Image (cartoon, rainbow, N blue to C red):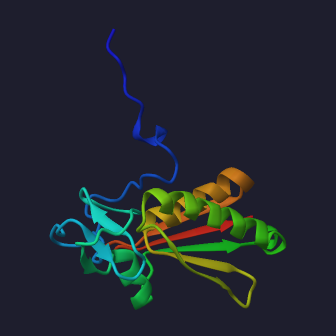
Amino acid sequence: MKATRSPPSATLPGRYLDLPDNAAHDPYQEREKLSEPTLCGDCGAVYRDGRWQWLAPPANAARTRCAACHRIADRLPAGYLAIEGLFAHEHRDELLSLARNVEAREKSEHPLQRIMAVDEQDDGKLMITTTDIHLARGLGEALRRAYKGELNFHYNKGEYLLRVRWER
């Protein structure tokens, strides 16, 4: 009997993001492969084996700024997560703790996925900005799994930007 593969939707939530065929690519990603090893002078991540990792900094490493640190310095997020509603206002600390835990898990394996800022707006809404669209989506899906609520995504065509809105 022939084995069947699971559909793409069976993958881990938040790990992959189905983007339109004409999706824009992250302008902060390196256009050419970096020499190895390369050290980010801001955060200490090391580029080795074709990806950024948390390793001990090698003595002979070239230096540059990783895409996440570049975005943070430019204050230009790739992902926005708006957390809205009365429940969000009443459980602010719980929700932020969940977001920080998800970020820590993702960042340990993917150093370019970070929370840039958490802002509480005048209307009580929380706005979390991220260095990567996949982290923004993962945060939203973690909120929905833990607390239900309504989750919406808006991907801007032509630019590498995802807006996520969670409300309960």
Residue at the farthest front position: 59
Counting the numbered discs, the total is 0
Q: Of 130 and 110, which appears nearest the observer?
A: 110
Quadrant containing the N terminus in the rendered view: top left
In percent of width and height, residue 91 lies at 81, 69
Q: Is residue 158 visible?
A: no
Q: Is residue 154 above or below residue 12?
A: below
Residue at the farthest right position: 90
Q: Residue at x 41, y 63 (%)?
A: 54
Q: Residue at x 38, y 70 (%)?
A: 45
Q: Of 124 and 75, which appears nearest the observer?
A: 75
Q: Is residue 82 above or below residue 153?
A: below
Q: Is residue 142 above or below residue 67?
A: above
Q: Of 59 and 168, which appears nearest the observer?
A: 59
In percent of width and height, residue 137 lies at 51, 61
Residue at the farthest top position: 1
**Side of 34 relative to 26 (left or right):** left
In percent of width and height, residue 104 lies at 57, 62
- Quarter of the view holding residue 35: bottom left
**Side of 66 relative to 142 (left or right):** left
**Side of 104 relative to 29 (left or right):** right
- Quarter of the view holding residue 59: bottom left
Q: Is residue 110 above or below residue 1?
A: below
Q: Is residue 126 visible?
A: yes
In percent of width and height, residue 162 lies at 45, 70
